Amino acid sequence: MTHPRYGSFDRVAETDRRALRMTVDGEAVAALVGDTVLTALRLAGLAPRVSEFGDGARAGFCLMGACQDCWLAVDGRRMRACATYVRDGMVIVTGWGETG
């Protein structure tokens, strides 16, 4: 599945951390040790979900795990992208809020 790309985020520091690979909706995505899932998604130009109210992609709202803006499935479990750290080989399914 090819995702539309949302916005532009660039890593400007801490580029020497070890690289990890994860799968997002079947697509390989790179990240670095210490990244949250939300950070990795945004750097890849992806969004954790699309708003159920039809106003487009959601990028995370509170960024501290208090809202429900970045729910997705990580290895089959419902998680917040902003409060979950990337692990090598993790499997992510976006859009959990719409169907889960």
Image (cartoon, grey):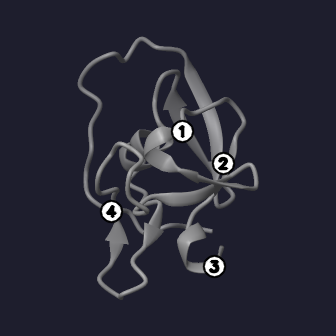
Q: Is tag 1's residue or tag 2's residue first in the polypeptide sequence?
A: 2
Three-letter amino acid code at the position of disc 4: Tyr
Q: Is residue 40 above or below residue 92?
A: above
**Mark-to-mark CA distance, 1 and 4:** 21 Å
Tell which circle, 3 or 4, labels the residue nearer the N-terminal end: 4
Q: Please report contact status of discs 1 and 2: CB closer than 8 Å, yes or no.
A: no
Instruction: Give coordinates of residue 89: x percent, y percent.
Output: 72, 36
Q: Residues within 10 Å of mark 3 (few under 14, many from 20)?
A: few
- Sequence-wise first label, 2 or 4: 4
Pinpoint residue 12: horizontal percent, then vertical percent.
23, 25
Q: Which residue type does callout 3 highlight?
A: Thr
Which residue bears the numbered disc 3? 99
Q: Quadrant of the C terminus?
A: bottom right
Identify the residue position indicated by label 1 in the image: 84
Q: CA distance from mark 1 to mark 2?
A: 15 Å
| Residue 59, horizontal then vertical, whole percent | 33, 59
Local secondary structure at mark 2: strand
State which quadrant residue 68 falls in. Answer: bottom left
Q: Quadrant of the N terminus?
A: bottom right
Q: At label 2, which amino acid type do we have?
A: Thr
Residue at numbered disc 4: 6
